Every structure is written in structure tokens, then in C-alpha cells.
Amino acid sequence: MRFVDTHAHLDGEEFADDRREVMQRAMEAGVDKVLIPAIDVASTQTVLDTCNQYPGFAFPMLGLHPEEVKDDWEEQLNAIWQVIVRPEVREMVVAIGEVGIDYYWSREFEEQQVLAFERQVQWAVDLQLPLMIHCRKGQQEVTRVLRKYQDRLSGGVFHCFTGNAFEAAELLSFPGFVLGIGGVLTFKKSHLPEVLAENVPLERIVLETDAPYMAPVPMRGKRNESAFLLHVISKLAACYGVDDEEVARQTTINVRRVFTNLPS
């Protein structure tokens, strides 16, 4: 059984002491590939360094996370763009991300977040790369920007979906986009099992960990890692009335459909 972790911050300091072992456990668990998102200028390099250390297994997604958007957002984006367009990097990058809107903690840089997000959506259009979208308390703004470019987008992932049936329907109205599902699915009070089973076809889901965050039950409270996706797969299988192999197979097909330049 082989599958893909579409979102893991394995370049982070949380993995500095045992990154090799984490990668090895992922491979042994059945992870075929892992996609690693940058969040700012500094992590652009750590993501690329990590992916270069694991060629054919780890692949970079580059962008500016909404929580990192400040008054200097244009300077940050210019610096990231200069990295993306380097020929050797352009060949590696599989998506623009992690980008989006996040008003959960603060709306201080509300306008800047929207502007930065739209600029990066334009990148995705220009480069014909998918988007890895982070959205908390900002779905209205995210969908409004995406509608402007809907006919030119190549698709993407709505990362860490935890919403209701209405929100799922609105996001899936964008062709080529899928929902990223991770550890929250396994939480005791999560409504996701019902929302997904009743409203979202398995063909519109990809797997993710968001490691080191949001470890699934029974690993909750621990540092998350890609190997723990086995618990998410089992929960999804129960939701859809299929076996684990089918979840792994279909979600991998979905990944290939969205991330068209990801090597086979």
C-alpha cells in the first residue's frame, strides 16, 4: 500500500535531531512521496535543502503563509519569486504554497493578506502550478479571489479542511481542487466523518499530516509525522465503507491529477 503525504513541514526545527529516522519511518509505513510547503522567505531555503536531501521522495511547495504576511509582504514575495524562477528550482517546485487567508488570530494585516494571496494565485496561473491553500476564518475572501481566476487555475488543495457540508460544496465548486484531510478526522468530537461520507466523494480528497501539528488519534499530543497517516487512512476507509488499500489507491490517483508535474 503506497500513498502520498501532501502537506508536511518536515524541514522544521522539530525534526532537526531525527529527520532521517522520520523519513525512514514514513517510507516503511508506505509513504511514496511527501510534499513540503514553505511559509516565508527563510523556510524557502530549508524546504529546498530538505527536498534536495531526499530526491524522488520529498518535493517543495513555495509561497508565503498568510500568518507571515506583514507590511513587508511585497518584499517577501519578491524574494520568494526570485527563488522560484531559478531554473533548477522551477523544475522541482510542485505547487505554490502554503498560501491563503487566516483571520483566526488577528485581522491586523487583513488587506495585505488578500493582496498577497491574489499575487500568489497569479503566480499559479502564470506557472500553471496548483495551489496549496490555507484558509481559517477567511473562506469568503479566498473564494472571491479564486473566482476571478477560476477559468485559468490548474487546481489545488484546500489544506486542513475541517468545515461543514456547505463549505465543502463551495470549495469543491472549483474544478481541479480537492480537500486535504488529516488528523482532525480522527478526533473524538470531529464532525468530519459525517460531512465527508455524506457530501464529499473520495475522488476529491487527498491525505496530509501538517506535521508536526495535529497528530491523529491514537497519537494525539505527540509530534505528528508522515508515518501516522496510516491512522487517517483507516478512519477514511471506515467513513466510505472501503478498505485501506482503496483509500490509498484513490487518494494517490487524486494527487497525480492535481500535482501534474510530480514525478511518477
Image (tube, rainbow, N blue to C red):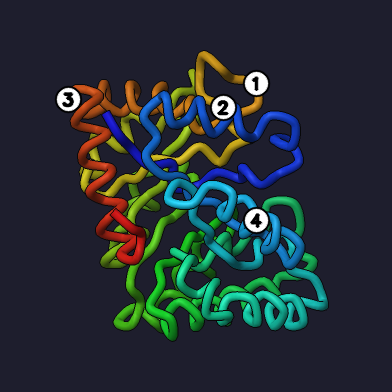
Q: Separation of disc 3 and disc 4 at Cα?
A: 38 Å
Residue 68 located left or right of residue 161: right
Alpha carbon separation for disc pair 1 and 4: 25 Å
Mark 2 is surrounded, within 10 Å at the Cα level, by few (under 14), some (14 to 19) or many (20 or more) other residues, namely many
Q: Which residue is mark 4?
A: 49
List the residue tagged with mark 1.
222
Mark 3, secondary structure of its residue: loop
Mark 3 or mark 4: name the one nearer the start of the chain. 4
Amino acid type, callout 3 = Val
> In the depicted view, which residue is nearer to us: 198 or 134?
134
Provide the residue designation for mark 3.
242
Instruction: State the mark number for residue 246.
Output: none
- Apparent side of residue 85 relative to residue 105 in the rendered image (left or right): left
Tell me how far mark 3 sits from mark 1, CA to CA: 28 Å
Compare marks 3 and 1 and give the one earlier in the sequence: 1
Looking at marks 2 and 4 on the same chain, the residue that comes earlier in the sequence is marked by 4
Inspect the image, locate mark 1, and give the three-letter code of the amino acid beneath it: Lys
- Residue kind at label 4, given as amino acid type: Asp
Task: For mark 4, give the secondary structure.
Answer: helix
- Marks 2 and 1 sit apart, C-alpha to C-alpha, by 6 Å
Q: CA distance from mark 2 to mark 4?
A: 25 Å
Quick one: label 3, few (<14), some, or many (20+) residues within 10 Å?
few
* Residue 96 pos. (x, y %): 51, 68
User: Residue 165 placed where, x, y %?
Assistant: 34, 45
Residue 116 position (above or below residue 8):
below
Q: Which residue is mark 2?
A: 215
Look at label 2 and name its amino acid. Answer: Ala
Q: Residue at x 31, y 28 (%)?
A: 236
State which quadrant residue 29 falls in: top left
Q: Considering depth in this image, is 164 or 60 the residue closer to the camera? A: 60
Q: Position of residue 70 (x, y in %)?
A: 80, 70
